[in-house]
Image (tube, rainbow, N blue to C red):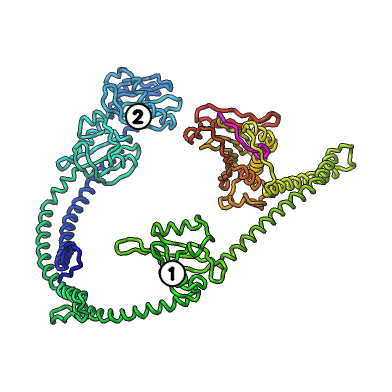
Amino acid sequence: MTISTGKVQPRRLALHHILFIGFTIISTLPVFFLATWAQKSAQNREMAIVEDKHLLFATNIASRLEDYVADTENLFRVLAQSMLTDLPSSQISELLQGIDFNHICLIAPDGTQLKHVEKNALGEVRPEITPDQLTRLGPELLLAGSKVGEIIFSRVLPDENGAPSLFMIRAENNGNYTVANLSTGYLSEVGKSVAFGKKGHAVIVDQTGQVLAHPNPAWRNSMEDLSKIKPVALMLAGKTGITTFFSPFIQAEMIAAYTTVPRIGWGVMIPQPLSELQEETGELHLAAIFITLFGIIAAAMTSWWLARYLTLPVQSVVKAAGEIRAGHHDTRVPAFSSLASREADELIAAFNSMIEEIEKVELQLKQSEQRFRDYASSASDWFWEIDSQGRLIWEIDSKQAGNWGLNFNDVKGRTREELAGDLMSDEQWRPYRKALAEGSEIKGFEYCYLGKDGVVHHAEVDGKPLFDSEGKYIGHRGAASDITARKQIEEKLQQALAEAERTSEAKSEFLATMSHEFRTPLNAILGFSEMIHTRYFGPLGSDKYGDYARHIHESGAHLLALINDILDIASVEAGKRTLLREDIDIKVLFSKCLSTIEKSAEERDIALSLNLQEPLPLLQADTRSLTQITLNLLSNAVKFTNRGGSIALSARVCNGQMRLSVQDTGIGVASEMIPVITEPFAQANSNSPRARQGNGLGLYIVKSLVEAQGGEMTIESALGKGTTITILFPLEQEGEQPPSRDDVPEIIGERPRSVRANRSPQVKQTKTPPEKHPKAVPKKQK
């Protein structure tokens, strides 16, 4: 039965046809996979046999090559010893004929050939090794020089006639080199000894992947580089196994076994075309095709009947549903005969039961709607609905009575802006107006209005947009809640916050005043204790008085430093520190700061370095504050850097900012402590003896002074790896874009040295190549 809906419905497959196709596919898949599995199993068995055979060939050839290498090395040792003695050249020539040696020579470190013997019956001296050959043997000669007494096999190289050959090299204890030229004829014979199938063959390559033996004479004579071929690359990595690859020689997919000669890194590969293996399984492939076709035909016939049997009950249910939709609510699906399946009977019974339940649900929905209205009317929030113009068109009653005592009839047809009057500005209404204009969600919008009691109240509104069946916006629907009490609490919190800020300012004022009061008597204590310690007016009678005076002076100095830090903090927090914008020459300021700190660095044998970009523009900042920032960072670096370490002070321009950095090789700070150490009186490790030397205010003062001038401070550190603190100040732009990171030159110099005591720090601007190190401040002469 076709149900008309007024729209053109796309043509769809019947359930009977879908089931038929599905059953056919499902039933034929096992047949297909079985046939494929049988064919694949045969191929795998054939492949396993081939792999074992190929790998055995490769292993046997590698074993023969290893024996050949051992015999060649033994004869080379005898020949090398003969070259060092007075043995006649004719006897050495006879020894050369034992294996494929062409000649042997003795070469001095400067390349002079001291002795040269060719393989010939008379032992005559033939032309020596050419300079070009010596140049090509350069890497092997260097390797042999680092392994005196060991025999080194070269990669395959052309001899004097351009034929492929190998060189054996040994560095002697007297500095000379014994070099023998070896023919690759034996290796070619070994490669030719392996042939099977139609195109199966053997390939031998040297330690760099160049051909030593190959059925292609042109590749063998040109010493073709096969290192890019997959099995050769695996051999060069020292691996043994089976792989497939595309052969550029045969232009076909190949399967190859490969292995290496461990002592010298040569590789042996036994490849065979995959097509030869596939030919052997061709008959099985044809049988698999016939089995698959027969299975598909049988499955299709069975699937057609089964699909027809299963769809009859469904068709009956669809017909009954169409009649119910047409208004015949008393329609039911009749029961089938005894041939119907149990599931068909259950489907029909469930459908008939569902129709009865739908009638009950309709009644329950009406009851539920009334229940919702009752709950909403007793809730503290209220529900509302507006049209596309923002006018209230529906509002459910609640104990809040909507807009604080205003009945729905009082607000019906009015907008919220009309209810608020002049209590809110256009900027405050902007999100609400935007939601109505765009038809988007209203979320957490707050507005105020004048209630029926004459008091201003606040409400928070949330709502979802409404659209008709064609997608046109028709209004919003949502909920509102009164937030007047919350707003009153927020206002009290703001007042408490303002009071807290005033208290903080009073605290800073008090600290500044008290610190000034402490400073006056401390200056007297420091002055008099220093006079006593230096015995300004003569002996004290006992040396202990001098020690006591020194302790008094040190304690007073420490207390004065703490007071000065507190004064700095108080002045910055109170906003009473005057910051002057001056043109600062960073080179001059950094040099003065290094002069101040160099004595402390020298006592700990710490190297100081100054790295500056050239040219470096002037920085507009407060000179006194920048000096204090630099000295605080340098003092911290000296205090937490171990003896023999280094500190680098650098400056450069990057992305329109002046980048000032202090980098040390000290003990570092744990990553989780970095956010903490810039707080007042905070220290990364309060148990450290070095930490007890300070008061934990240095970095806090630095950060405060930097931020007061519009700068930014970053800290990078790790335990045991030192610390880098970077200060970024914006530069004044004068119609010119700041240089990009790529345009900023690198700051390069010489390696840092220790600072000595009687010379000022020196800064050497560098234009040296990148491989040199930053130049440091030289040590003063003691």
- Which amino acid, by three-letter code, is at mark 1? Lys
Where is residue 89? Give x, y as percent: 33, 20
* Total number of numbered discs in the rendering: 2
Please, what is the three-letter code of the amino acid marked with disc 2?
Met
- Above or below: residue 653 compared with residue 296: above
Q: Which of the 4 image quarters holds residue 364?
A: bottom left
Quadrant showing the C terminus: top right
Query: Which is more toward the observer, 782 or 413?
Result: 413
Location of residue 356 in the rendering, given as x and y in whole percent from the top left corner: 26, 81
- Residue 106 placed where, x, y %? 38, 22
Question: Vertically, is 421 above or below 607?
Answer: below
Residue at 42 percent of width and 29 percent of height: 142
The residue that mark 1 highlights is 412
Q: Helix or strand or loop: what does disc 2 sit on? A: strand
Q: Secondary structure at mark 1?
A: loop
- Residue at x 71% of width, y 48% of height: 566
Q: Which residues fall within the magenta stretch?
A: 614-627
Q: From this view, report whether residue 235 is shown above or below residue 104.
A: below
Image-based side of 519 in relation to 231, left or right: right
Left or right: 270, with 312 as reference point? right
